[in-house]
Image (spheres, rainbow, N blue to C red):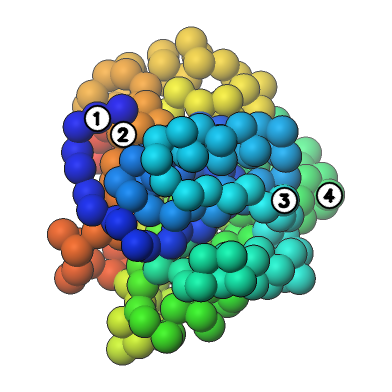
Amino acid sequence: MTNVKHDFYGKVVLVTGGSSGIGRAAALKFASSGAQVIVADVAEVAGKKVAEEALSLGGQALFVHADVSRMDACQALVDKAISHFGRLDFAFNNAGIIAPLCPVGSCSEDVWHKVLNVNLTGVFNCLKCEVAVMKAQGGAIVNTASVMGLVGAQGAAAYCASKHGVIGLTKAAALDYGRDGIRINAICPGFVDTPMIEGNGTNANKSATVASRRAAIRRLGTPDEIADSVLWLCSDAASFVTGAALSVDGGFAAC
């Protein structure tokens, strides 16, 4: 982890997709900064392990099994946060999936709907439940989009569409709830060394090659680097930032 320090003592944060990769890194960074953390994921064994790691850092942590594509699961998740910790200050809506690369004409309806249901509808479901309780004291929400929400990618129609949608949803929600003291932003990671990159038929070496050819910083990003941007967006240092789509991509989208 990097040495950037934030003071989140007494704050409660919900992290979806918290069992691995960027979500795990963010959950642990929030915990080490004093926050009480709800780790949510469909991967129960890994998610519980992250919650245990967060506890070992001196914070309070709880794992909740949640499928964000279901509104009832998201409502139960937020209800659990309130019943257990009494409030919700921050949310990192990070749960997402990718699919094997294929052109639009070969993309099945099942794959299309599955990716959109998790990546876009899942963020909508979480946002809807989170803003309802954050109105009590304000808060900050960060949604995971992607550099592929800013550009296109051959063979990744469903993923690109879902992440472009997250950015539009983020901007609209920021306008809806700014006067309620709720800041809502998106992060747009580039190629990051996480387990997810295995899911599109590629691997870390191939992704590193793509990054080295196009990004200004010619390497993969790390989960900690992305998590640092999430904590910053939730902190008072970003008090005048809302409706933003923050690229954390090593300059991938700059060219």
What residue is drawn where x is 23% and y is 53%?
7
Question: How far apart are labels 1 and 3 at the CA level?
Answer: 29 Å
| Mark 1 vs 3, N-terminal side | 1
Are discs 3 and 4 less than 8 Å apart at CB? no
The amino acid type found where label 3 is placed reads His
The answer to whether 91 is drawn above or below residue 192 in the figure is: below
Q: CA distance from mark 3 to mark 4?
A: 24 Å
The image shows residue 24 at horizontal and vertical percentages of: 50, 37
Can you identify the residue that label 2 sits on? 225
| Farthest-out residue, bottom | 179
Disc 1 designates what residue?
A: 2
Question: Count the marks: how many?
Answer: 4
**Secondary structure state at the residue bearing disc 4:** helix
**Label pair 1/2, CB-CB below 8 angstroms:** yes
Quadrant location, the C terminus = top left
Q: Earlier in the sequence, mark 1 or mark 4?
A: 1
**Eyeballing the image, is 181 above or below 15?**
below
The amino acid pointed to by label 1 is: Thr
Q: Quadrant of residue 200?
A: top right
Q: Which amino acid does the dot numbered 2 rest on?
A: Glu
| Residue at mark 3 | 65
Crowdedness of circle 2 by 10 Å Cα count: few (<14), some, many (20+)? some
Q: Which x, y percent locates residue 4? A: 19, 38
- Residue tagged 4: 110
